[in-house]
Image (cartoon, rainbow, N blue to C red):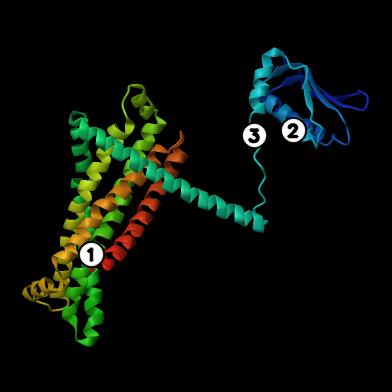
Amino acid sequence: MTSDPKLERIAKGNALALCATGTWTASFAPVLERMVADAEKLAGGSQNIFIDVSEVAKLDTFGAWLIERLRRSLTHGAVEAQIAGLSANYSSLVDEVRRVRATPVVDAGTITITGMLEQIGRAVAGVAGTVAGLIDMLGAVLAAGGRVLIHPRSFRLTSTVHHMEQVCWRAVPIIVLITFLIGCIIAQQGIFHFRRFGADIFVVDMLGVLVLREIGVLLVAIMVAGRSGSAYTAELGSMKMREEIDALRTMGFDPIEVLVLPRMLALVLALPILAFLGAMAALYGGGLVAWLYGGVDPEAFLLRLRDAISIDHFIVGIVKAPVMAAVIGIVACVEGLAVQGSAESLGQHTTASVVKGIFFVIVMDGVFAIFFASIGM
């Protein structure tokens, strides 16, 4: 049997007393919403406020939340509204609802100095938290690598080879294609502008130095961050959502050693290979355009390229590759392990993985540029 819900004010001296009766469930939502909204206006200057629910015949989560909302609305200053007559059957439900914190209303239209400083502070704290997380992951990976060196039988060769195939072998076509096109574009633009000064041949110098030192490895690292970094984050995030990582810990396995270390090692080995193939493809594309568009014979192109570049240019580019790979892998794994139990969280952390990976790759490229310039390379 169900009875219509009611919320009546009863006389109790100077105190404000409300008596709830009937069925307080979601099926009477419109009626309950109106009654609670009217009762929220009754606070006035009452010293004591009571909400009697002893006559409530049936209560669900919706009704419990409305009672708690009414209690919060009638609470003002030092006066706190009290819920009386709560039966043992519903006390745990009301207590659970009471633990839900009210979300403060933020006025988006009001901009204050305090609010701006708060946002700056939160942003700085977020950056500090990101850096701390990356350092923590780096330490965990190094520790796992040390354990593998001490006990080589624990190294997961099959997993590493599998990730090498995914990161390196399957990425070769797209890496070669894009770097080839970039080499063509650089050569075409260089010839177009150098031709005004009668210096078409200098496009070979520009192409060789740019591709081997900067553009080749940087472009490949950005593509790997978008392709493999996002894949790492999505894989680890999905495992986190399905509690597979917790299952590994329960079975006595270290998730860093089982999941992260093979991926990191595969990425560190794959990126120098991809950077080398990308550089060769870019040089080939640039030489092809210089021949067809600029009239530079292949023999002249190769002779000029040999004079324009040295082994130092190649070393500078290749040295950057494993460091950038480590940065991409650490960022991807940190974001993957930070995923919570929702698809929205997975999407947010995957996006953050790509953005942060590309950002740190560019930062590392700048650091390397300053370092190599300081030592004369």
Residue most extreme to the front: 375
Mark 1 or mark 3: name the one nearer the start of the chain.
3
Q: Which residue is mark 3?
A: 101
Q: Is residue 305 left or right of residue 68?
A: left
Circles 2, 3 touching at the beta carbon (< 8 Å): no
Task: Identify whether 271 is placed above or below 5.
Answer: below
Horizontal side of residue 108 vs 254, given as left or right:
right
Q: Residues within 10 Å of mark 3 (few under 14, many from 20)?
A: few
- Which sits in the foreground, 101 or 35? 101
Query: Quick check: marks 1 and 3 in contact, CB under 8 Å?
Result: no
- Name the residue type under label 2: Arg
Q: Nearer the viewer, residue 225 or 183?
A: 225
Q: How far across and how far down the image is residue 237, in percent?
A: 38, 37
Tally the marks.
Answer: 3
Between disc 1 and disc 3, the foreground one is 1
Residue at 25% x, 36% y is 146
For marks 1 and 2, give the one nearer the viewer: 1
Where residue 6 is drawn, which disc sits there?
none
Q: CA distance from mark 2 to mark 3?
A: 11 Å
Q: Choose between 192 and 376: the one closer to the eye.
A: 376
**Alpha carbon of mark 1 to alpha carbon of mark 3: how far?**
54 Å
Q: Nearer the viewer, residue 313 or 345?
A: 313
User: Who comes first in sequence, dot 1 or dot 2?
Assistant: 2
Please name the residue that numbered disc 2 is placed on: 72
Q: Which mark is residue 213?
A: 1
Tell me the kind of residue under disc 3: Arg
Q: Residues within 10 Å of mark 2 (few under 14, many from 20)?
A: some
Q: Position of residue 356 (x, y in %)?
A: 39, 51
Q: Amino acid at mark 1?
A: Arg
In the displayed image of the protein, which residue is found farthest to the right?
A: 13
The quarter of the picture where the C terminus appears is: bottom left
Secondary element at image label 1: helix
